[in-house]
Image: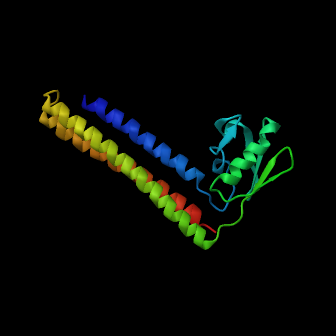
Amino acid sequence: MVIDALKEAEARMKGAVRSLEDDLAVIRTGRASPALVERLSVDYYGNPTPLMQLATISAPEPRLLTIRPFDPASLKDIERAILTSDLGLTPNSDGKMIRLSIPPLTEERRHDLVRVVRNRAEEGRIAIRNVRRDTHNDLREFEREKIISEDELRRGESDLQDLTDRYIELINDQGRRKEAEVLEV
């Protein structure tokens, strides 16, 4: 029972770390990355669709993204989605492809982005702690119902804390890496 609960907790913690990775990939740094726009929601024939399902996204230069739609009719929808997003980028279209020039970040904008990174990392740590709390409550419930012994409960709590510490450190590392990437000139 304890092992199953810990495995489930670890799976949920991995999900929180993956979610943070996805969130941080969207935060703009000084260089072009397809991850910046690939999850951007485009209204395609009335359905919100991720951009990566509608177009090929590439970064031919460090400060340039190119977006080549599979369906040329979706070009205007993609442009509209980029303009209404909070990326602060202006698309340049030649009728077949969209070019996004990534301007260098100002110092003030870099510090704003660092705050965003720190907030996202804190949300990730909160998610990990919520998993720990839920699993801890489950372990206590197992002990109350006499499914596990008090010794198993203590061992499980110790293993759960080790697991939590490991995943919180992973989140901290990701946050530090992204902060360094954002502050890099």
| Location of residue 102 with respect to 58 vertically, above or below | below
- On the image, the x and y values in percent for residue 7 come to 34, 33
Q: Viewed as shown, does residue 4 lie left or right of 45?
A: left
For the N terminus, the quadrant is: top left
Outermost residue toward the bottom in this view:
107
Q: To which quarter of the image does residue 89 belong?
A: bottom right
- On the image, the x and y values in percent for residue 68 come to 79, 42
User: Which residue does the image show at 45% across and 40% down from the upper left?
Assistant: 15
For this rendering, which residue is in front, 53 or 5? 53
For the C terminus, the quadrant is: bottom right
Q: Viewed as shown, does residue 170 lie left or right of 65?
A: left
Please indicate, yes or no, whether residue 3 appears anywhere in the rendered image: yes
| Location of residue 110 with respect to 171 vertically, above or below | below
- On the image, the x and y values in percent for residue 170 come to 43, 51
Q: To which quarter of the image does residue 6 belong?
A: top left
- On the image, the x and y values in percent for residue 37 come to 66, 48
User: Which residue does the image show at 43% across and 41% down from the upper left?
Assistant: 14
| Location of residue 48 with respect to 81 vertically, above or below | above
Q: Viewed as shown, does residue 167 lie left or right of 74?
A: left
Q: Viewed as shown, does residue 44 lie left or right of 10?
A: right
| Location of residue 78 with respect to 104 vertically, above or below | above
Please indicate, yes or no, whether residue 58 appears anywhere in the rendered image: no
User: Which residue does the image show at 78% across and 45% down from the upper left?
Assistant: 76
User: Which residue does the image show at 70% across and 54% down from the upper left?
Assistant: 83
